[in-house]
Image (cartoon, helix red, strand yellow):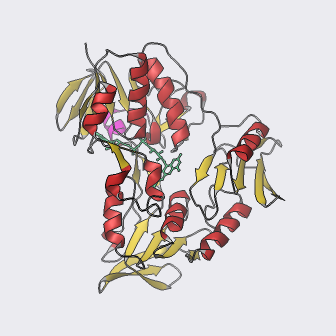
């Protein structure tokens, strides 16, 4: 019997494996992964510092332990370089493997900033627990100066997390942090909270160059100003990893296009997690690089792999922004419905923002401070969302 092969041991790969094993205890399951296959919760990376966690404390199970739990063969440190959908084989550093069904859970790659300067290559991105280990080494002692490029979700979370012990400068081209995801009132609230924490926000500008300067870096901004930093972190975004999909001739958009069942354009090849673009079968696909959609996709794909086709149900799920100094929940505006407007309300010390599309249907919201009750109440108010 040929195995089911999963490529990738991030949350997408391991969750689909776990869900599959609940339904099918016998079909051979192979997981091929480029990393060491340790299980960790990636969202922890941007709030582990304040909790005093080292990288080694974030990995809860080794690959061998995961193999035992999942009844799977896990081959670590091997990068899959080619897929032959007709022959149903994958080619990896560790050899060639035949599959019955294949799941791509290869994640996303950090967008490399295009920078001048002799230290541009030393800018760090954190998209894996190993990156976090490097980052912890690079930031050095408390009090060191860290320049963070990008005030999106990850940049803001890192800024708030590190501000307790380090001197943080947060740089972004937008006039407010989290501009792409949050209502302006919430972005303004976050800005104020970060400033109270001592974060130096440089907004409306970008990093132009990073140069070595004695034992530190000279960071030059596009507005001509310069600052010194002991480490430079780039949090300017992630892009689905399409290398394998392209090599295999699968259809891609921003991500690997999958239909409502998580199936790619090739028979018996599925994709989920940060690499996937969901809903391509029903028009207008969307990349959803968050845990909630990944979990829904994993449950559905596991059922389909186990022989009972199940469509992925992507229910609206707010993103919890892990900025303890201004805790927010955000349900971002759907990609296909940006021609509406935000409405803001201050109620009992909370900022509540509702987004209505051009037809007056509420399709997004944001709230700070957030807690489960208010999230549920806002979710219940939602109209049918346009995807
Ligand atoms: P990944 O975790 O990137 O896993 C990809 C796997 O594929 C890896 O094991 C890799 O080694 C392997 N791989 C890649 N290419 C190959 C190949 N060719 N051959 C073999 N193996 C390969 N989401 C939320 O919902 N809430 C949050 O609070 C939140 N916080 C976050 C904080 C940070 C700092 C980051 C970076 C992300 C955060 N996210 C959050 C997003 C969330 O963590 C991701 O959506 C999710 O972890 C993606 O999992 P994945 O398995 O798709 O990808």
Q: Quadrant of the N terminus?
A: top left
| Vertical position of residue 53 compared to residue 3: above or below | below
- Measured as percent of width and height from the top left, residue 115 is found at 39, 71
Question: What range of the chain is rendered magenta?
Answer: 244-251
- Measured as percent of width and height from the top left, residue 202 is found at 56, 77
Position of 46 with respect to 78 (left or right) is right
Q: Is residue 175 shown to the viewer in this render?
A: no
Which quarter is ligand 1 in? Answer: top left
Quadrant for residue 141, please give it: bottom left
At 55% from the left and 65% from the top, the residue drawn is 151
At 50% from the left and 85% from the top, the residue drawn is 225
Q: Is residue 147 shown to the viewer in this render?
A: yes
- Measured as percent of width and height from the top left, residue 143 is found at 42, 79
Q: Nearer the viewer, residue 172 or 49?
A: 49
Q: Quadrant of the C terminus?
A: top right
Position of 229 with respect to 28 (left or right) is right
| Vertical position of residue 234 compared to residue 116: above or below | above
Does the magenta-highlighted stretch encompass residue 19?
A: no
| Vertical position of residue 332 compared to residue 281: above or below | below
Q: Nearer the viewer, residue 196 or 269?
A: 196
């Amino acid at each position: 019997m040929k195995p089911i092969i999963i490529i990738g041991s991030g949350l997408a790969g391991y969750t689909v494996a776990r869900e599959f094993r609940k339904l099918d205890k016998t079909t051979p399951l192979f997981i091929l992964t480029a990393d060491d296959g340790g299980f960790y919760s990636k969202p922890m990376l941007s709030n582990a510092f304040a909790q005093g966690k080292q990288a080694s404390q974030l990995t809860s199970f080794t690959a061998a332990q995961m193999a035992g739990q999942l009844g799977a063969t896990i081959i670590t440190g091997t990068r899959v370089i080619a897929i032959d959908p007709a022959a149903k084989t994958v080619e990896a550093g560790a050899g060639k493997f035949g599959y019955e069904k294949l799941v791509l859970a290869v994640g996303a790659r950090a967008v490399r900033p295009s920078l001048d300067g002799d230290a541009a290559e030393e800018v760090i991105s954190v998209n894996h627990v190993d990156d976090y280990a490097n980052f912890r080494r690079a930031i050095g002692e408390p009090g060191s100066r860290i320049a963070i490029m990008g005030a999106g979700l990850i940049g803001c979370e890192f800024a708030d997390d590190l501000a307790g012990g380090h001197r943080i400068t947060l740089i972004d081209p937008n006039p407010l942090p989290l501009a792409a995801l949050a209502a302006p009132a919430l972005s303004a609230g976050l800005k104020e909270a970060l400033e109270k924490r001592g974060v130096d926000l440089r907004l409306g500008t970008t990093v132009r160059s990073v140069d070595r300067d004695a034992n530190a870096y000279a960071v030059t901004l596009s507005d001509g100003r310069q600052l010194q930093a002991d480490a430079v972190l780039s949090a300017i975004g992630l892009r689905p990893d399409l290398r394998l999909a392209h090599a295999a001739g699968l259809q891609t958009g921003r991500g690997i296009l999958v239909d409502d069942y998580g199936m790619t354009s090739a028979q018996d090849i599925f994709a989920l997690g940060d690499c996937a673009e969901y809903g391509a079968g029903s028009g207008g696909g969307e990349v959803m690089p968050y845990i909630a959609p990944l979990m829904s996709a994993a449950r559905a794909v596991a059922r389909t792999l186990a022989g009972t086709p199940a469509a992925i149900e992507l229910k609206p799920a707010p993103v919890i922004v892990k900025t303890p100094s201004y805790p927010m929940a955000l349900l971002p505006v759907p990609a296909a419905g940006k021609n509406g407007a935000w409405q803001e309300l201050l109620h009992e010390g909370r900022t509540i923002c509702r987004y209505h599309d051009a037809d007056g249907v509420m399709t997004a919201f944001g709230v700070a401070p957030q807690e489960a009750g208010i999230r549920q109440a806002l979710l219940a108010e939602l109209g049918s969302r346009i995807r």
